[in-house]
Amino acid sequence: MDLPTGTVHLASHLVVDAQRVLAAECRALLDGAVPGYVPIVRGGGKMHVRMLCLGRHWNGQTYRYESTRADFDGLPAPPLPKSFKDLANSIARAAGLTLDADLCILNYYDAEGRMGLHQDKDESAESLAAGLPVVSVSLGDTARFLFGGLRRKDPVTAIPLHSGDAFVFGGPSRLCYHGVSRILPGTAPSPLGITGRFNLTFRQY
Ligand SMILES: O=C(O)CCC(=O)C(=O)O
């Protein structure tokens, strides 16, 4: 499949055992002392994922990053685990790009989960100008991921993201529109012991 410059799909990047360990960590974080929650965005719409931000919190009302969850419960964003940061940076290297990840948005999609087309553009002006990549890791059920161009109306390509896939977009692709149109329930590898899908997107603020 032809992907634009700066976009790399690393299919089956994580072996099943690494996926299992990471999925267990994601579950523990989402159900931890600072739990995942369903954000309500500007305009009042509820997102269709359960979200937990690590390292920095993305505020769904202001579309800015902050240290505490002012749009929800005021709790501090949990730190980004070093193992997560190392994984993200190594995936960026494998894609031929450089990243020093300092935040991760962890999303859980149930069978009805989805995410509308959007750009990731709330990181710092310096990070965006440098085209520092977004590194995405998928675990569990397959997602129908949509990847488009720099304008909302540009055509999109539907790419199945399977458990263990990494998807990286940086450089001239950094601001490409993307989203998830649906989850394919029951497709998670059984050793993970999960229903639904975790997605981690790592960024450098
Ligand atoms: O779940 C995905 O694959 C994409 C997530 C995403 O677009 C985001 O967190 O901004």
Image (cartoon, rainbow, N blue to C red):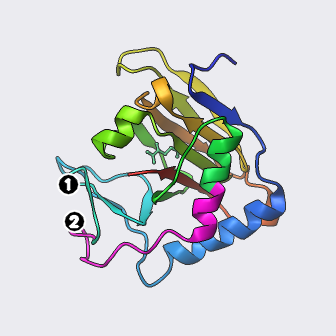
How many C-alpha atoms fall within 10 Å of the one at disc 1: few (<14), some, or many (≥20)? some
Q: Quadrant of the N terminus?
A: top right
**Who is closer to the viewer here, 47 or 147?**
147
Q: Specify whether tag 1 is near ligand 1 (CB below 8 Å).
A: no
Residue at coordinates 71% horizontally, 41% vertically from top-left? 94
Vertical placement of residue 82 versus 96, above or below: below
Q: Earlier in the sequence, mark 1 or mark 2?
A: 1
Q: Which element type, helix, strand or loop, lies under badge 2?
A: loop
**Who is closer to the viewer here, 188 or 35?**
35
Image position, residue 153 (x, y; %):
36, 16
For the question of whether residue 118 can be seen, the reply is: no
Image position, residue 96 (x, y; %):
66, 35
Residue picked out by circle 1:
61
How many C-alpha atoms fall within 10 Å of the one at disc 2: few (<14), some, or many (≥20)? some
Image position, residue 51 (x, y; %):
42, 61
Vertical placement of residue 168 versus 194, above or below: above
For the residues marked 1 and 2, what is the alpha-carbon distance in whole angstroms? 6 Å
Q: What secondary structure predominates along the stretch shown in magenta?
A: loop
- As drawn, the label of residue 122 is none
Range covered by the magenta-colored residues? 69-87
Q: Are marks 1 and 2 in contact (CB under 8 Å)?
A: yes
Q: Amino acid at mark 2?
A: Asp
Residue at coordinates 50% horizontally, 78% vertically from top-left? 31
**Who is closer to the viewer here, 201 or 147?**
201
For the question of whether residue 84 can be seen, the reply is: yes
Residue farthest to the bottom, as pictured: 33
Image position, residue 81 (x, y; %):
55, 71
Side of 33 where 75 appears, left or right: left
Residue picked out by circle 2:
71
Q: Specify whether tag 2 is near ligand 1 (CB below 8 Å).
A: no
Residue at coordinates 43% horizontally, 27% vertically from top-left? 176
Q: Amino acid at mark 1?
A: Gln
